[in-house]
Amino acid sequence: MVEPSDPPRYVSDSAGAPPVPPPGGYRGARRLLAPSVSPAVGAVNGSAGGDGRDRTGSSAEDPPPRSASRRPRSSLGWIALAAAILFALVGVVLAAMGATDAFFSTTMLVLQLVVLGLVVAALVTRPGRRLGAAALTVALVLNGGTLGAVSAVRTAATGSYAGHKTAKQKLWESYPGIKDKDPQIFLDQQSLEELQTLADETMGDVRARLTAQYGLTWVKTSDAQERPERNGYGGESMLVRYSSPVWATTQPVSGYAHKLEVMRTVEEVIGEHGWRGMIAFNDPASGVDPSVIPKMYGGATPQEQVSWEWFSDDRPDPGWFYADITDLANDTTGQYRASREHTAQRTGEPLEGLQLAVVGRYMLSAAKADDFRTALAKFP
């Protein structure tokens, strides 16, 4: 029992601090283990005033400053970059294989959208922005649209497109003739070799006659060419389009009366080789739409035109004979001269004068006639 005269065991100061516990602590109270503090930290804290803060005012329990934290890695940026590269590699392989139809399938569209979504997600996050930019560059350069266009151009040039064609469609791609044309026509008409001979003989005689009568001299501006004709089923036939060598005068042919004399002489010589009378496409009397003549030939009438185009054929055979005159003396705007100068720089041909050429469509070589008949046997 405590006597009233004894001093109080628990006292409090004026600051309101809690009373100190009795010696040995309160009965039944659990003692918490204090965290171990290194002497250096303790010394620092002690020197700071014993309140747990260092000289900068930071507590030992405060988080480290922002500059001391490690910048987090961006897994999303790496995922976006890897997806863009993988999509580009798949696209390059498909383009090399000629699988053009794959680029326009639903699967490729969905994959492209997934890649785009990953790239956008990486760009909007600070850690993934740099890798997202790299992924965006890859996606912009090697995307489905670009690779699909490259593949389409390649397959169109090589004719290697297979797509989803049936066996029947693939068979007709190798048809040796022309769609909707009787193949017997090509066997009965003059052969490629016969037209080549006719063209050489005709133009040789025309050049000789014009040189003898008008003193014109000549230069060959291009060699003969043969190009396969398309068969109308997506492939190439065994027929060719033949273009003879082109011959041009080295002197201008000017003046309406003089040009008429030259063209009539050409018509006379080719008639001796079986060609029909010539048609002047540049003349409104030829039946050509008069509204297009000024645009095509530089004038409404032959007297004021820059270009003349006369034509003949040797029906029923497929040869076409062309005699064209370019007369820059009638070029009042300079437009035709500029065009001719550009062409002359590219081909080396004279700026103006008379040109002769022969063209043949759907020509079958005599050396391939038997192969043509054998190939036709595969088709009903």
Image (tube, rainbow, N blue to C red):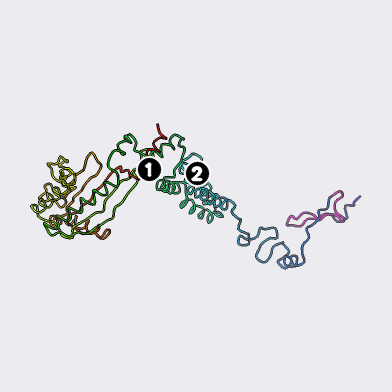
Q: Furthest residue to the right? A: 1
Q: Nearer the viewer, residue 162 or 41?
A: 162
Specify few, some or many for label 1: CA neighbours under 10 Å numbering under 14, 14-19, or 20 or more: many
Q: Amino acid at mark 2?
A: Leu
Point out the stretch of residues depicted in magenta.
Answer: 8-29
Image coordinates of residue 269 in percent, x first then y, are 15, 49
Could you say which is closer to the camera, residue 190 or residue 73?
190
Residue at 23%, 45% in the rendered image: 320
Outermost top residue = 380
In the image shown, does 347 or 4 lie closer to the viewer?
A: 347
Q: Is residue 340 magenta?
A: no
Q: CA distance from mark 1 to mark 2?
A: 39 Å
Horizontal arrangement in the rendering, residue 93 relative to residue 222 (left or right): right
Q: Which residue is mark 2?
A: 113
1 or 2: tag closer to the N-terminus: 2
Q: For the residue marked with disc 1, what is the amino acid? A: Glu
Q: Name the spot of residue 173 as percent of width and height, x first.
A: 41, 39
